[in-house]
């Protein structure tokens, strides 16, 4: 499913003062691509992702999914939050089943899909555990499977590894890539981590701290699974870091 973001602007007002966070942001994501929005904190990445999800209204512009306008949340877009946002009172199984129940799938369809997702994420045997009883990596896999449970056309991920310590982060990037390769859902991910962007993405859109301007659209032409020690890998890291360093910083 293709995703089109066209001239999106967003202004927030507080105490009579208006602040433009995004101005005329446009890009296109082709079906099956893993695309990352990379930029410094405060550049509007999460605001833009929330508009695409339908959680926020744009001040102007339009988001389209396969040429149909997006105006509100819907099952065609799955969302993975930074803190996983799993229901603590539900088991792994119940968390993954939740979106399927919301869509009123038949019991037979629910259990077939549940079995597929648990196997994909290697969570069999953990399905009756609660979030407090599983590791950070298992929480991440559960959140990813829950987002996929409703068969979304696009998966939106807001710093999905942001709550993970750096030591575990590379391992989970590899797990996340392996899960995505099995499914190849269209993905739009937000991160401020250059390494993460290079490892996971087919394309990286570099955003400025100033009104979310797109400073670059970089295709990551590396075979998967990616080798972090390769020279070409480090060249892409430098290529993505340069526009961020040169970009004007926000005041305040």
Image (cartoon, grey):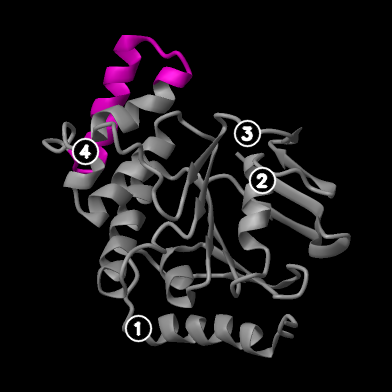
C-alpha span from label 4 to label 2: 30 Å
Residue at mark 4 to residue at mark 3: CA–CA distance:
27 Å
Q: Is residue 243 magenta?
A: no
Q: Position of residue 200 (x, y in %)?
A: 43, 63
- Judge the density around disc 4: few (<14), some (14-19), many (≥20) Cα neighbours within 10 Å: some
From the image, tell me which residue sits under label 4.
130
Mark 1 secondary-structure assignment: loop
Q: Earlier in the sequence, mark 2 or mark 1?
A: 2
Please tell me how crowded label 2 is: few (under 14), some (14-19), or many (20+) other residues with Cα within 10 Å. Answer: many
The correct choice, above or below, for 239 with respect to 143 in the image is below
Q: Residue 136, how many percent across, how many down?
A: 26, 56
Question: Which circle marks residue 73 in the picture?
Answer: 3
Q: Nearer the viewer, residue 104 or 120?
A: 104
Q: Residue 43: x, y in percent?
A: 67, 69
Q: Read off the magenta span.
A: 101-123
Residue density around tag 3, few if under 14, some if 14–19, many if 20 or more, within 10 Å: some
Label 4 or label 3, whichever comes before in sequence order: 3
Cβ atoms at labels 4 and 2 below 8 Å apart: no
**Image disc number at residue 143:** none
Task: Give the labeled residue for mark 1.
Answer: 230
**How far apart are labels 2 and 3 at the CA level?**
9 Å
């Amino acid at each position: 499913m293709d995703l089109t973001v066209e001239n999106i602007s967003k202004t927030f007002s507080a105490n009579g003062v208006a602040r433009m966070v995004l101005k005329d942001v446009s890009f296109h994501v082709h079906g099956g691509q893993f695309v990352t929005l990379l930029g410094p904190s405060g550049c509007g990445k999460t605001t833009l992702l929330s508009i695409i999800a339908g959680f926020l209204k744009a001040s102007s512009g339009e988001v389209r999914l396969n040429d149909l306008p997006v105006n509100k949340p819907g099952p065609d877009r799955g969302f993975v939050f930074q803190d996983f946002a799993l229901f603590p009172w539900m088991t792994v199984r119940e968390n993954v089943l939740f979106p399927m129940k919301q869509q009123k799938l038949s019991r037979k369809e629910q259990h077939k899909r549940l079995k597929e997702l648990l196997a994909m994420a290697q969570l069999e045997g953990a399905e009756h555990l609660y979030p407090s009883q599983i590791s950070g990596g298992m929480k991440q896999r559960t959140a990813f499977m829950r987002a996929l449970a409703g068969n979304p056309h696009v998966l939106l991920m807001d710093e999905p590894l942001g709550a993970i310590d750096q030591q575990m982060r590379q391992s989970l990037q590899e797990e996340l890539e392996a899960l995505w390769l099995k499914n190849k859902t269209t993905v739009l991910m937000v991160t401020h981590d250059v390494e993460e962007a290079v490892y996971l993405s087919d394309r990286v859109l570099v955003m400025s701290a100033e009104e979310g301007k797109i400073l670059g659209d970089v295709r990551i032409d590396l075979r998967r699974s990616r080798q972090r020690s390769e020279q070409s890998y480090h060249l892409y890291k430098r290529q993505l870091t340069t526009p961020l360093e040169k970009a004007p910083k926000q005041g305040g």
